[in-house]
Amino acid sequence: MVEIKEIAGGQESSVFSQMGQFDHEQVVFCHDHDTGLKAIIGIHNTVLGPALGGTRMWTYATEAEALRDVLRLSRGMTFKSAISGLNLGGGKAVIIGDSKKDKNEAMMRKFGRFVNNLNGKYITAEDMGMTTLDMGYIAMETKHVAGLPESQGGSGDPSPVTAYGTYMGMKASAKKAWGNDSLAGKKISVQGTGHVGGYLIDYLVKEGAQLFITDIDQDRLQRISSATGATVVGLDEIYDLDVDIYSPCAMGATINDNTLSRLKCQIIAGCANNQLQDENVHGPALVQKGMIYAPDFLINAGGIINVYSEVKKLNREWSMQQTEQIYNTTLNIFAKAEADGTHTQKAATELAQKRIDDMAKIKRTY
Ligand code: NAD
């Protein structure tokens, strides 16, 4: 009956067993022959509130790969919102296809109708492969869309808020490492100078940090370097630099077996999602190396905080205040990890899970 199968170690695993692995509540498969829409909506957990998370359009090689991605990403959203004190659950959607060739108004609106059928249990937003225009089409069919541009009544670009949270997490890490949170004179390498990286660099320059930056976009790199005096370094060279802080702000999995033997920094704090290639391996490895790791889903939560402000009709000032709390939460996580003898990513996940469990208990009575 169930078509999509994951082959793990030669063993087939059904959709239900994959959902069971991380306790997903609901997975919705959406298909429309006329528009060619093939989408999967993953709802991981709605104890705290509606599942919120973006829709990603990607050329997945197999349906199993798309399913795996939506399950992994929706679970991540649960913990990100929970640890940020938001009353949101975790969800995510993926559309299978080439975002440059396969998209059109009808497909986006059809997808919007599928989202609408969930009656607000899932709220969607923009993610990779989607544009403001696409979100506008989806919003024609459902009100359960967030993260829209200000011109469409939304909360606008979340990147400045994400950058502020990352900056707070970095300062808390400095406090832990050096006893005070000043970044003045610290050597900091920033990998990725895009939306978030760019705003983060502004904060770091203002504080007098000594910056080393890299990006595949050479034009942007040169522009930022001329404006800030940051030193441009090579894409791979960044892992060998003698710096105090490494800030991954581009792609995930940059903390892996290869880079761990090369990194010399004392702190890793950046906005990229899923920085640890394997958190069970590289989380403990960072502890062994005596490096301080600010959990990614905690310190990059400014974006979801900003989206939440839109859902709850709060303003940017509220988002910035709430995001500032990332400083204290990061310090709490460091203390918890030390007390529990574990790594910080695990401590953060456990703290998020505890909030979900506690809130589930209070909902037992009417
Ligand atoms: P972006 O696309 O604006 O910027 C990413 C930058 O990284 C680009 O300039 C790109 O050229 C560069 N890049 C890509 N591959 C690279 C490589 N191999 N080496 C060096 N640079 C490379 O994206 P963004 O919105 O700034 O997000 C950055 C990261 O933060 C992503 O992992 C994203 O998922 C995560 N994130 C972003 C937000 C947000 O509010 N935008 C929120 C949470 C997490």
Image: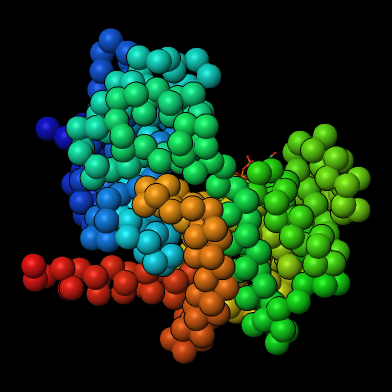
Q: Position of residue 54 (x, y in %)?
A: 42, 41
Residue at position x 51%, y 29% in the image: 132
Kindly give the residue lying farthest to the left in the view shown: 366
Return the residue nearer the eye: 113 or 8. 113
Q: Is residue 204 left or right of residue 339?
A: right
Q: For residue 211, which quarter of the picture?
A: bottom right
Return the residue nearer the eye: 64 or 9. 64
Q: Is residue 27 left or right of residue 139?
A: left
The quadrant in which the C terminus is found is: bottom left
The quadrant in which the N terminus is found is: top left
Q: Quadrant of ligand 1?
A: top right
Q: Is residue 126 above or below residue 191?
A: above
Return the residue nearer the eye: 145 or 54. 145
Kindly give the residue lying farthest to the bottom in the view shown: 339
Q: Position of residue 80 (x, y in %)?
A: 42, 60
Residue at position x 45%, y 36% in the image: 153
Q: Can I make out residue 248 in this image? A: yes
Query: How did the renderer colour the structure?
Result: rainbow
Q: Position of residue 74 (x, y in %)?
A: 35, 49
Residue at position x 50%, y 60% in the image: 318
Q: Is residue 155 above or below residue 228?
A: above
Q: For residue 89, which quarter of the picture?
A: bottom left
Q: Is residue 29 above or below residue 231?
A: above
Q: Position of residue 31 (x, y in %)?
A: 25, 22
Residue at position x 79%, y 38% in the image: 220
Q: Can I make out residue 256 in this image? A: no
Number of residue marks = 0
Q: Is residue 157 left or right of residue 147?
A: right
